[in-house]
Image (spheres, rainbow, N blue to C red):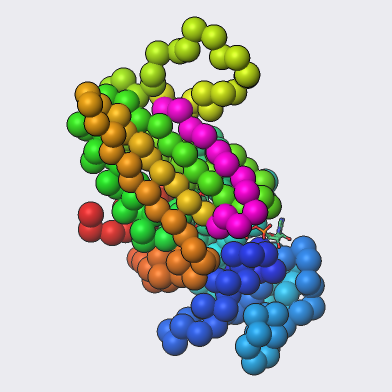
Amino acid sequence: MVTGAAGRMGREMTKGLLQAGDIEVAGAVDRVAVGTDIGTLNGLQPAGVLINDDLGAVIKTTRPQVMVDFTVAAAALANARLAVEQGVCPVIGTTGISPEQLDELHQLCEARQVGAVVAPNFSLGAVLMMHFARQAARYFPRAEIIEMHHEQKIDAPSGTALKTAELMAEEIETALAPPVAEEKVAGARGATYRGLAVHSIRLPGAVAHQEVILGGQGQLLTIRHDTISREAFLPGLLLAIRRVLHLKGVVYGLENLLEL
Ligand SMILES: NC(=O)C1=CN([C@@H]2O[C@H](COP(=O)(O)OP(=O)(O)OC[C@H]3O[C@@H](n4cnc5c(N)ncnc54)[C@H](O)[C@@H]3O)[C@@H](O)[C@H]2O)C=CC1
Ligand SMILES: O=C(O)C1=N[C@H](C(=O)O)C[C@H](O)C1
């Protein structure tokens, strides 16, 4: 089942799931487009699954194995609690979930022996970009992250940028440049997370893009990923759905399901 099924990601991923031979979409939840068939909503044949705004009722009536969540951070943890309590494995793409919320999910999943995947980015290219940035961080003393997204994105920095900084911080020792003597305009040097400067751009025309720039003596290394269309997220989501059924506890980051 999919929560946030009427959103940008929910629609695109539901469309892909409806077309995947080995997956049945049992239910769809959203606060909007209630009563709309998810097939029709996505330009396909009617699928016989109507969007419902009551997650508890959908879980009880359809008994799904997996709940895919693309909603908002404020809803994602509550949705996951409901799912795990019913033995349903959450696959969460929603970003903005705090480390404390992630800990709570870890404990809940351990206690119930239910698998969950939380992945700030399901695009395999973005996962590789993060992996390469982490590797490169071993050899460069400084790095900064620039992420660019569409204007409707509500969180900043992106979940991908935060995850990238977390991965790089495990390798890099002095990522943060010395503070400038005078920041003439507040925020000019971006935000700081895990010792790395992170800059967020929001522009029409953008989908999801990130550059990691590493600096060393006499050289710069730029690692960049561009999401041109949301279809990019489907193969990673399918992988997570198929694997989560065999997990116990939470896997945070798709890189942990790939042999990198
Ligand atoms: N992990 C990944 O690969 C990706 C993650 N995302 C993340 O997915 C999330 C959703 O992004 P978009 O689809 O662009 O947003 P969106 O705003 O288009 O869709 C969110 C949907 O969730 C619904 N919603 C909100 N609260 C709800 C609740 N309590 N119960 C049920 N439905 C609820 C909204 O009505 C809306 O239809 C964001 O956190 C974004 O950062 C986005 C793209 C890729
Ligand atoms: O909101 C988006 O669009 C995206 N959100 C995720 C994030 O916050 O990193 C993944 C991707 O960048 C698209």
Q: Report the residue at 57% width, 41% height from top.
A: 201
Name the residue at the front extreme: 218
Ligand 1: which quarter? bottom right
Task: State left or right for residue 93 relative to residue 137.
Answer: right
Question: Does residue 247 appear in the picture of this structure?
Answer: no
Q: Is residue 38 above or below residue 84?
A: below
Between 92 and 183, the one lying in front of the other is 183
The residue lying at 35 percent from left, 30 percent from top is 143
* Quadrant of the snapshot with the N terminus: bottom right
Instruction: Tell whether 235 sits left or right of 18.
Output: left
Q: Is residue 202 visible?
A: yes
Residue 68 x/y as whole percent: 55, 65
Please determine whether, in this image, residue 84 is positioned above or below residue 104: below
Residue 59 versus residue 186: which sits nearer the camera? 186
Residue 223, by quadrant, is: top left
Q: Nearer the viewer, residue 23 or 156?
A: 156
Magenta region includes residue 23: no
Q: Which residues are magenta?
A: 196-207
Residue 100, position as x, y percentages in the image: 53, 35
Where does the image place residue 255, in percent across and percent down from the top left?
33, 53
